[in-house]
Image (spheres, coloured by chain):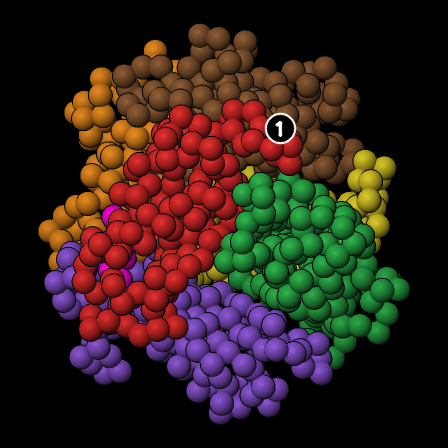
Chain colours: A orange, B yellow, C purple, D brown, E red, F green
Amino acid sequence: MFSVTVRDHIMIAHSLRGDVFGPAQRLHGATYVVDATFRREELDADGIVVDIGRAAEELRAVLADLNYRNLDDELDFAGVTTSTEVLARTIAGRIAARVHSGAMGPGARDLDGLAVTLHESHVAWATYERAL
Amino acid sequence: MFSVTVRDHIMIAHSLRGDVFGPAQRLHGATYVVDATFRREELDADGIVVDIGRAAEELRAVLADLNYRNLDDELDFAGVTTSTEVLARTIAGRIAARVHSGAMGPGARDLDGLAVTLHESHVAWATYERAL
Amino acid sequence: MFSVTVRDHIMIAHSLRGDVFGPAQRLHGATYVVDATFRREELDADGIVVDIGRAAEELRAVLADLNYRNLDDELDFAGVTTSTEVLARTIAGRIAARVHSGAMGPGARDLDGLAVTLHESHVAWATYERAL
Amino acid sequence: MFSVTVRDHIMIAHSLRGDVFGPAQRLHGATYVVDATFRREELDADGIVVDIGRAAEELRAVLADLNYRNLDDELDFAGVTTSTEVLARTIAGRIAARVHSGAMGPGARDLDGLAVTLHESHVAWATYERAL
Amino acid sequence: MFSVTVRDHIMIAHSLRGDVFGPAQRLHGATYVVDATFRREELDADGIVVDIGRAAEELRAVLADLNYRNLDDELDFAGVTTSTEVLARTIAGRIAARVHSGAMGPGARDLDGLAVTLHESHVAWATYERAL
Amino acid sequence: MFSVTVRDHIMIAHSLRGDVFGPAQRLHGATYVVDATFRREELDADGIVVDIGRAAEELRAVLADLNYRNLDDELDFAGVTTSTEVLARTIAGRIAARVHSGAMGPGARDLDGLAVTLHESHVAWATYERAL
């Protein structure tokens, strides 16, 4: 099994609803350092999983729609707890949609899986993994 | 599959018995930067794997019993080689016991798996993974 | 010259006023990984700059007043651009006040200088250095 | 499942053939920070996956044949696209050969799997995983 | 004193002339993770050293002229040993030229100093510092 | 001003005498990730501060005398508090002695300064700087 990972980041504001979140129920924010991992069983004809430059561009494009925003005001997250885990799944879903639409090139349709990790600090991070 | 990871550390002394360990047979020590990863297939009703603050507290509680100790003098490790791998398994076992006892809350009992990584330096680390 | 550095973090929301900030004029947020560096020419009678555990506690105490907050709503920052640089200076000032008040112990009054670095992502950080 | 990982690095020149590589078709180079992960279900009689010192030596030996070279001139890579993914597989293959030949000791023959990650920068890396 | 640092990277091939360089006399390559630090005594009217986004763009522009190249073939380095130290000075010089030309905005002309660090691996880096 | 830094590590046991150290008065241990920084105003005739490979070898040689030891039993530290700060100064002194003896080559005698940083964890480190 092969994988390629690219890293970028977003800076957002949000609040988390539910007693379990304690002080994070207040409006606060986070830098999420985001790692997107693309997996496939065999390399493509060019000897790669996906071009690293192309993967970085796609990740950047997906993150651009979230960057410098207050997620509490975003329609896409109305009624949704924007926990680190949920955001990892959301970003993975948006990358998957681009893969399936052909935005990452025809070869990317042979990708087998995807993982997205959001580092919310130097001591905490969350990952969501899915098939493609 | 979702996961959440929290990081903390311990500073211990120990020696390792067996020719294979070479100079590490002498009494020496280590800072272990410890990553505890909690896994579950689906998020709970709050949209999380486990609260990151709660997970960090539990890890800290488990590590407190090991921190600033000479493991050669600890009854729990009598006759045991305290290799990085064994310590990762020990810490995972103690976290699992807390999960099963309900110390991390009732929701934590739905966790599917746990991994513990101990970084003994910037160039070496070990991981133990288990089901919960 | 000796120094000791301890690291912690905060997660805040804010917006930045001024055309120069582009999209960061919108309400967004950041995780700041904060490094506080204490400097002195000579070690104290215990052979240290300052106890690392004590320094970590003081940094945590100073950061607690900022953590999980929207800085746009904080009286302390009314009319202030809470840039990474300004926050580094603010945190340094609060640590200096604790040092001068004796909160870090009488020995800490012999510290010569202080630096505070705020990492806003894996690719950007800012530092403020001052005498004590 | 247990694993042990050791880290080292190489500095090489190469060029990548194929339109997909854009500017990387020119002769350029990379530092690859290389992580080799050894996996086994159960620990050996010494309580380890593999001795960390021994693993580091083996990784160093394998990397020595690649270090400070222009891969475009190496017979082993004639006609091969030396993408990060392909190099990860090549290094994994060479480590596996050493394991199978007994170079890492008789116990290493019980290893279950191997993963090799090549970090080409702070924002991109690739992994190849295989059974042993 | 305040500073702001931004990070980016380049991937180059080169060889180093001189017995002191041992195996690095062969054509090989490196990923340089590049940190550019901008210093000034006092913040500008916007409360910053320099806008972090602007600084990142300038660093990227300077690095673009070096990226994916064999420095042995570049006219700018004819007869020059492209050691990590020399490259740090070269990059600092090019950033300084942009600052002085006004490319970073009129405010940047009040910058007091600049440092450039090139990380050639996880275990080695070099820095060049200069006034502006 | 130029500098070159190389990184290595040691794993030691020790205890710290004095109430200020709290639980660290017990026998425990640490991995110290050690950064040695060599400084000079101008580059030498080869265009470097010091050869990075040579610097790494010297650091390794100095650290070998401390590695895998219980510092409480070492004659060199009899009656000495082996705090992170004191160890940084000790290591700097030993590197300086090698520089002055010519062990790092005649060119190294033109070095202007030296700094040694010991990282005792991901959240704490200490530095000692001196002239050469």
**Towards the viewer: C50 or B84:** C50
Disc 1 marks which amino acid? Pro
Examine the image and state in which quarter residue C23 appears.
bottom left
Q: Residue E28: in sight, yes or no?
A: yes
Identity of the residue drawn at 27% across and 67% down: E110
Q: Is residue A90 above or below residue C132?
A: above
Q: Is residue A119 above or below residue A95?
A: below
Q: Main secondary structure of the magenta part?
A: helix
Identity of the residue drawn at 40% across and 26% down: E73
Residue B128 in magenta stretch: no
Which chain's residue wears label 1?
A: E
Q: Is residue F39 left or right of residue A36?
A: right
Assign a secondary structure to mark 1: helix
Q: Is residue B75 left or right of residue A6?
A: right
**Towards the viewer: A52 or F13:** A52
Q: Which residues are magenta?
A: E50-57
Residue picked out by circle 1: E23
Question: Would you call the spot at circle 1 few (<14 residues within 10 Å), some (14-19), or many (20 or more)?
Answer: some
Examine the image and state in which quarter residue C120 appears.
bottom left
Residue A108 place in picture, x, y as percent: 27, 21
Residue A30 place in picture, x, y as percent: 30, 58
Q: How many marks?
A: 1
Identity of the residue drawn at 69% across and 72% down: F23
Q: Is residue A95 left or right of residue D120?
A: left
Identity of the residue drawn at 57% across and 70% down: C4
Q: Is residue A89 above or below residue A28?
A: above
Residue E120 place in picture, x, y as percent: 50, 41
Residue E52 in magenta stretch: yes
State which quarter of the image contains the N terminus of chain C.
bottom right
Q: Is residue C102 left or right of residue A102?
A: right
Residue E56 place in picture, x, y as percent: 28, 50
Q: Residue A2: in sight, yes or no?
A: no
